[in-house]
Image (cartoon, rainbow, N blue to C red):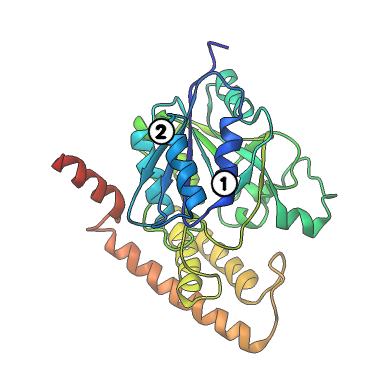
């Protein structure tokens, strides 16, 4: 297996304990010839069991453990990219279960096909599989799944069973060639706030500007536990900050990457689904809740416009700039 690429497995984490330990343990069990594990830890204080586990695992040089004093998922991804050594960068969440052969499933795509720049793995999302009873299967995604204006409501990486080209990946299970970062110059946009929803979609849309394609491989699967607490942010889904950030991130993705026509279709679908609650969102049709969600939608839009305007003089890579400044002082 000497011709297989080396892999850097990146695990950003925030306020996770047992799930984080289990996720790391699953990676370390992988039978793959050349990989490293980078944990970017944004947790201020861990439980003693987790603290001891991380110290012992890092001390044994099984993982590279980095502690930072800020919380940003795209910032943590960029931080790890700068410190990684693998030919392939594989990003997973801190609450996943990995089957045997997970790393091999990602790597074989790069070994066999030089046109592939990214691999989107299948996600056995615990909540979404429960909704369908685990019985729904999809062979070919519909054409709409490749339309950047409405793809996000048609691309299903939970139930799709056939390998195929896709427009985006799920952030909890995605990998990229190192050249995407070093030669193409792509980075994760740290202006995506809160839970950083759509930050991976934004990255994948910008990847279209390269000569590489994103390939969906259902064999590169994992189970996403979807823990209710912890993760990449410190705000609950019911908070004002979360709701405004949720819409801000959607609008920012559209304003950055889509044509005016595509934006109108995307923003319209966002309103229809997330504000009015129509399928596939299936939210409450209560007038009070619709008005409330509509106010978040409006606030998010204006905040995204403000972010876009600021980008003319500020690229918004706050955590990368902080890291680069610290490196200069060393």
Inspect this view and state whether residue 317 appears: no
Task: Report whether 18 appears left or right of 9.
Answer: right
Q: Is residue 246 above or below residue 239?
A: above
Q: Nearer the viewer, residue 129 or 280?
A: 129
Q: Which residue is mark 1?
A: 172
Q: Is residue 126 above or below residue 185?
A: below
Q: Which residue is mark 2?
A: 59
Mark 1–mark 2 CB contact (< 8 Å): no
- What residue is rendered at 65% in x and 52% in y? 225
Furthest toward the bottom, the residue is 288
Q: Quadrant of residue 192?
A: bottom left
Kindly identify which numbered label has been placed on residue 192. Answer: none
Query: Label 1 to label 2, Cα distance in Å?
Result: 26 Å
User: For the residue carrying disc 2, how many other residues have a C-alpha within 10 Å: few (<14), some (14-19), or many (20+)?
Assistant: few
Quadrant including the C terminus = top left
Inspect this view and state whether residue 226 appears: yes
- What residue is rendered at 22% in x and 58% in y? 313
């Amino acid at each position: 297996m000497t011709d297989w690429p080396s892999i850097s497995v990146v695990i950003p984490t925030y306020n996770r304990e047992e799930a984080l330990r289990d996720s790391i343990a699953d990676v370390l069990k992988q039978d793959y010839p050349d990989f490293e594990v980078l944990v970017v830890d944004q947790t201020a204080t861990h439980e003693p069991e987790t603290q001891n586990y991380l110290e012992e695992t890092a001390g044994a040089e099984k993982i590279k453990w980095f502690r930072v004093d800020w919380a940003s998922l795209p910032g943590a991804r960029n931080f790890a990219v700068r410190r990684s050594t693998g030919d392939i960068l594989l990003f997973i969440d801190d609450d996943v279960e990995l089957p045997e052969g997970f790393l091999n499933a990602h790597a074989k795509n790069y070994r066999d096909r030089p046109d592939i720049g990214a691999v989107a793995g299948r996600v056995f999302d615990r909540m979404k599989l429960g909704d369908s009873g685990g019985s729904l299967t999809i062979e070919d995604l519909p054409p709409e799944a490749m339309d950047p204006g409405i793809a996000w409501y048609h691309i299903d990486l939970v139930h799709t069973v056939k390998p195929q080209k896709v427009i985006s990946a799920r952030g909890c299970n995605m990998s990229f060639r190192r050249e995407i970062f070093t030669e193409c110059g792509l980075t994760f946009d740290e202006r995506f706030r809160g839970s950083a929803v759509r930050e991976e979609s934004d990255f994948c849309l910008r990847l279209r500007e390269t000569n590489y394609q994103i390939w969906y491989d259902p064999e590169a699967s994992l189970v996403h536990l979807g823990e209710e607490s912890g993760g990449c942010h410190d705000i609950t889904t019911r908070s004002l900050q979360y709701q405004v950030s949720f819409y801000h991130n959607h609008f920012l993705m559209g304003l950055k990457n889509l044509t005016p026509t595509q934006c109108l279709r995307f923003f319209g679908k966002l309103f229809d689904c997330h504000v009015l609650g129509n399928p596939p969102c299936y939210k409450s049709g209560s007038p009070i809740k619709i008005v409330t969600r509509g106010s978040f939608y409006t606030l998010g839009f204006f905040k995204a416009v403000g972010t876009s305007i600021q980008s003319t003089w500020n690229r918004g890579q706050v955590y990368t700039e902080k890291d680069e400044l610290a490196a200069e002082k060393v």
